[in-house]
Image (spheres, rainbow, N blue to C red):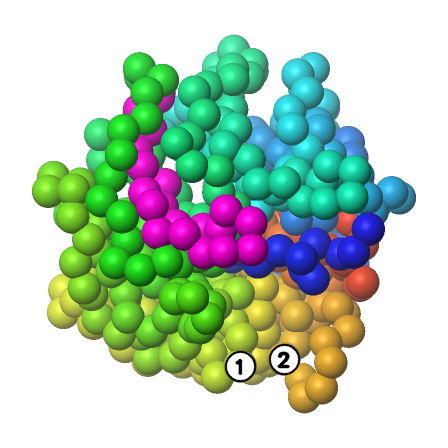
Amino acid sequence: MPRPSALLPIPFTLLLLGGAVFSARGDGAPLVAEWASSGELSVPRAYATVVPLATGEFLIVGGLDRDTPNVVNETSELFDPVTEKSRLLADRLPGRVNMSATTGWGERVVIAGGSEWRGDHWSVLDRVDVFNPFTRTWQVARPMARARTGHGAAALPDGRILVAGGYDGPRLISSAEIYDPRTDRWTSAMSLPQVRGDFSLVTLPDGRVLLAGGLEGKNSLPAKLSLYYDPARDRWDEGPATLADRVLHATVQLPDGDVLLIGGQRSASGMTERYDRRTGTFVYSGSLAEPRMLPSAATLPDGRVIVTGGLPVIPGPRDFTPTPRSELWDPATSTWTEIAPASLARFQGRLIAGEGAIWHLTGAGTDEQALASVERLYWR
């Protein structure tokens, strides 16, 4: 089977002990961070989806298998960061990649769309599954009106979930719809101004949703203009332009509600920018020590941001060898500082911040090898 990266748009979204000094704590003592092994998943996965749950566990869904690359995992599992153990859930789901996973009303996790490998081709899904973290059970929900993959999804303030754009196969689409987990119903929403996929979709503190980056138009060119969705008016409005054409990047929301865009392809690979919600503009927020696309990123409680992994951006053909280098962003100075590198490099993994630690799960290694290892970054 051809690798999914050759067939599908890839959405956006440390084993050896290593230490690095990150600035200082409030009492003036140095803050030391270390990477360490933190268990394994039940099944190796590449391009899987990971969601932190209200129970403190992490839900892992889908992704490609390590030993048989033409198999997309039909399983899901729960990883407990306290015990460092993972267990498979009983229910089988469609084996898929490039789906959205969004936590909405009642802490339900809504898995929508994605791409499933069927014999000799990829098929785009309208399938929706909802996970209840308190009963640890899956329920098949009403399907979307439009099958889509590589789309964006964001939880609205009332617990409903906005799904927009993506691909219906080889073509970008513009349609949008909203799912209500309370009633298991979909309603149509205003379509995007033009077809678009592989973008960031983030809910702002004022209830609007910011769409940034991605590919748009019939020629699938990088999009520079951002958009706002206002759920009160069911309307998309023009937002500010990003400083760089950005796709295959990482996106994190900061504690103050601002949004940081990290890396990506070509001109965006080594630069980061922040959406400033007070001015409604994107501002330059520092250069990475190593340009990268498809990195993993997470926000610390104090507003600093960790980025690790990703594919280095180098001239010539890409060899799918991820970088192990890790960096720390300081919001006070908008600068990046290198910290201890990971010993197990991966790209398109998921970093999840918890109490005193950050966990790194899934992702793909060299030549897109599926990974089972879980690592954590902790500080003292």
Q: Which residue is mark 2?
A: 313
Above or below — where is 171 with respect to 107?
below
Total numbered circles: 2
N-terminal of the two: label 1 or label 2? Answer: 1
Q: Residue at x 73, y 37 (%)?
A: 118
Residue 19 visible somewhere in the drawing: no
Task: Give neighbour class at mark 2: few <14, some 14-19, many 20+ (Cα, 10 Å).
Answer: many
Which region is colored magenta?
Answer: 163-181
Q: Residue at x 32, y 26 (%)?
A: 186
Residue with the most extreme left position = 233
Closer-to-camera residue (238/335): 238
Q: Is residue 173 magenta?
A: yes
Q: Residue at x 87, y 43 (%)?
A: 68
Q: Which residue is mark 1?
A: 266
Mark 1–mark 2 distance (CA, rounded to whole Å): 7 Å
Q: Tell me the number on the disc at residue 68.
A: none
User: SS of the residue at dot 1?
Assistant: helix
Q: Residue at x 67, y 57 (%)?
A: 7
